[in-house]
Amino acid sequence: MLLYVNIQFLLMNPFVVFVFAPVAIIIGIFLAVFWWVRFGSRNAIAIKTGIVTSAIVGIAFTLWAFYAIRTSCSSTAAIGYLFLPYYIFLLCSAAYLIGWSIATIIRAFYVISHKTRQTSLRKWPVYIAMAVLVLFGLLAFNFSARKLLLKKAYVSASESELDALYDKAVSSKDIDLLAKLAKNPSTSQDLLRQIYSSIPASTFKYPGSNYSPVFAELARNKKTPSDILKSLSEKRAGERLFIAANPNTPADVLEQLARDKDSLVRTQLTTNPNVTKEILIELKNDPDKVVRSYANTYWQRRGFSDN
């Protein structure tokens, strides 16, 4: 399940899809053509193109991934090392197929245009190459359309558009689309209530996982009604971390979160601008030293006196 979520994140990264992969493929094809001209081995040009392109993609992506993981501020970034081999395999496989397909078609056009009798042309690799490019073209088109749809759900300020996107998300049980709607700062409280109350809880979760991006975004959104935040705090342990920092969280929930068993929740609670002096005093005496440190820091920032 975690692999599925990480692959989804990888595919949603526009740098990898629209910048990194095309540049690597172009470089691979250029080097393969240079290899062809330099050493005169024309029969294997398609295979060479695929190998060179795949190697460039693998090496470049590995270097970029190591840099991204090492410089990440996330405490869980090191998990990326576990999935790096899968990413490399997927990207290298795709780069090889694309590079091989482009070179195969270019070679076919060269043979046909020059009517080269010495060079045999088998048709079935050309058909396969065309099918591969069409497939990747459709995937790129669907990805682009998906990316634009999710962006629209996050940035749209039109109430009618948001309602239409909500209906679409509900009918298709689209978790990511619902999450973007819940994250949109322009989403009205009425629509946030609909997102929370009108859909079964199972719709909000990824398959085989208890993680819910929709509930997480509802817990983060500063416009989420306080009664929903209270309900989430009672039913969803995973979202209490976000609820603790939400300035719209009601006072009675803040008091309960001050005694939450998760120290990360109590730490986040100290950053809430509405946390009371009494709660901060309690957190300043917390058993966890990190919670105490944060509580003392925000005690000073809030200008509270020890007297």
Image (cartoon, helix red, strand yellow):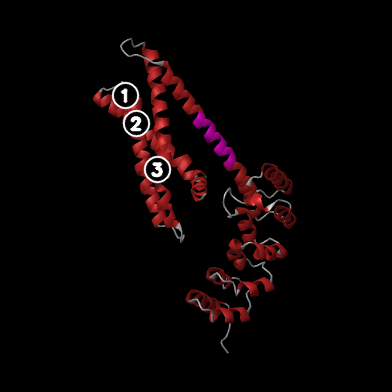
**Nearer-N-terminus badge (2/3):** 2
Q: How many residues crowd mark 2 within 10 Å: few (<14), some (14–19), many (20+)? A: some
- Distance, label 2 to label 3, CA atoms, is 21 Å
Q: Position of residue 117 (x, y in %)?
A: 33, 9
User: In the image, what residue type sits under mark 1?
Assistant: Ala
Question: Mark on residue 44?
Answer: 1
Q: Secondary structure at mark 3?
A: helix
Magenta-highlighted residues: 135-146
- Return the residue nearer the eye: 109 or 87: 87
Q: Is residue 66 left or right of residue 232?
A: left
User: In the image, what residue type sits under mark 2?
Assistant: Phe
Instruction: Kindly indicate the quadrant of the structure image that contains residue 224.
Output: bottom right
**Nearer-N-terminus badge (3/1):** 1
- Identify which residue is drawn at 36% across, 25% down: 46
- Distance, label 1 to label 2, CA atoms, is 15 Å
**Residues at badges 3 and 1 in contact (C-beta under 8 Å)?**
no
Residue on which the image places disc 2? 30
- Identify which residue is drawn at 35% across, 39% down: 56
Question: Mark on residue 74?
Answer: none
Residue on which the image places disc 3? 88
User: In the image, what residue type sits under mark 3?
Assistant: Ile
Q: Is residue 139 left or right of residue 29?
A: right
Residue positioned most to the front: 208
Q: Is residue 137 magenta?
A: yes
Q: Secondary structure at mark 1?
A: loop
The quadrant the C terminus occupies is bottom right
Q: How many residues crowd mark 3 within 10 Å: few (<14), some (14–19), many (20+)? A: many
Residue positioned most to the bottom: 307
Residue positioned most to the left: 39
- Identify which residue is drawn at 51% across, 48% down: 9
Q: Is residue 260 left or right of residue 18?
A: right
Instruction: Kindly indicate the quadrant of the structure image that contains residue 86.
Output: top left
